[in-house]
Image (cartoon, rainbow, N blue to C red):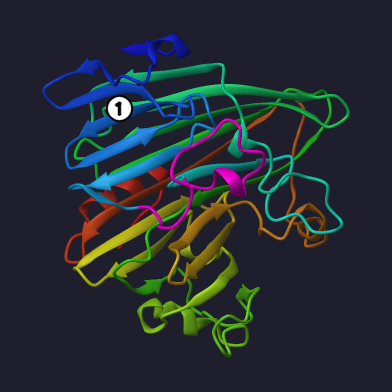
Amino acid sequence: MKLHLVPAQFSTTETLLLETSDFSIHAFTYSTGVEALRIQIGRGQFVWLPFFGQSLWSWKLDGVEQKFEGFVQEPDYAARDFLHNYGAFMIHCGITAMGNPTKEDTHLHHGELPLARYKEAWIEISDGPYPISLCGKMQHRIPFIAAYEFAPSLRILGDGTSVYVDSTLKNLQKTDLRYMYLNHLNFAMTQAVRLEYAMDQFTQDTVTVLDEVVPGVVADPSLFLKVGNYPVYSPELVAIMKNQPQFGPVSVNKMYRSDGTVVWVAANTKELDHTVAWLTKTPDRGACGFSLPATAGPRGLAEEGRQKNVKTLEAGNSVTFTYVFGLDKQAENKKLQQAIELLGGQYE
């Protein structure tokens, strides 16, 4: 079943759109006028912005917010840039550029996708482990710059503890399209104890740390893995990792919490050959973006171009970025195993 969405379905009064014995979907608008869906399924509650960036604004499990703290409280169409709208749990970034622009760059902070307006948005309901899919499609056409179609989809696991993301980029040009992509997954820093990455060596040779916010961390990146040991990451710690082919087609990165749970992100490394870590911790804010699936680092178009990380998509061709995030008890890996199978890999 497919339910097409239009802005007229949304108002400041929250209304029920769809309800079954397993889930409910309500529509509402924020005080800023941004349309949103609230999905209650299993242990999870999700707030999704169908027409504004297709961002996942919130993810709660058992009533507990999973996203970062101390950032923008409501999405706002009037926000003039990425930072002034920075409050979503999950944000698509790219496509013509991505990352923090330097003096050499003219692109928007993290590209045009975070503030993109979607004319097409819909919900798909189906049988199987991921019964709800949140979907959309937008076209970006700027003369002399780029022409492409971007179509993301978020598939929610029936118990609300995991989301499978696949986002397809299609080149609408008759010439090659240069592109960058990153998914900004902004987990809470609360209860984070340590991080674990799919790498046999976690050294300066394999991990590039951009900020010396912890003494010695640039030379020894392993220092930031024990995130629970540091009261402050100010203003932020950013690290870039290239996913290693010897670990197979899927990388799995984990954040262990003091409550006995593990948060994980699994990405298909064929297209997402980079992982970016973004951590911040002060009395005013906290975020553990420990695993952002990406095609490049976030150093801006000019620098990533010099690093030969900007990808090329041939005329008329498409590429799909796939990754899954979720939460398990430390003693169990059932959801993670299922996710890796969907991504086409094996897990031991």
In the image: residue 203, left or right of residue 329: right
Residue at image location 47% in from the left, 60% down from the top: 291
Examine the rendered structure and indicate whether residue 216 appears above or below residue 121.
below
Q: Quadrant of residue 164?
A: top left
Q: Is residue 348 above or below residue 216?
A: above
The residue lying toward the viewer, choosing from 71 and 257, is 71
Where is residue 286? Give x, y as percent.
Answer: 43, 65
Q: Which residue is mark 1?
A: 132
The magenta segment is: 67-87
Amino acid type of the residue tagged 1 in the rendering: Ile
Rendered location of residue 331, percent (x, y): 16, 66
Magenta stretch containing residue 70, yes or no? yes
Question: Residue lying furthest front in this view?
Answer: 31
Which one is nearer the viewer's eye here, 74 or 21? 74
**Residue pictured at 42% horizontal, 82% vertical:** 230
42 in the magenta segment: no
Q: Residue at x 78, y 52 (%)?
A: 301
| Residue 121 spot, x, y in % from top left | 47, 19
Compared to residue 238, the image places residue 328 above or below, namely: above
Q: Residue at x 67, y 39 (%)?
A: 80
Report the side of 256 relative to 116 (left or right).
left
Image quarter hosting the N terminus: top left
Q: Position of residue 348 (x, y in %)?
A: 30, 63
Q: How many marks?
A: 1
Q: Residues within 10 Å of mark 1 (few under 14, many from 20)?
A: many
Q: Main SS type for the magenta part?
A: loop
Q: Residue furthest bottom?
A: 216
What is the secondary structure assignment of the residue under circle 1? strand
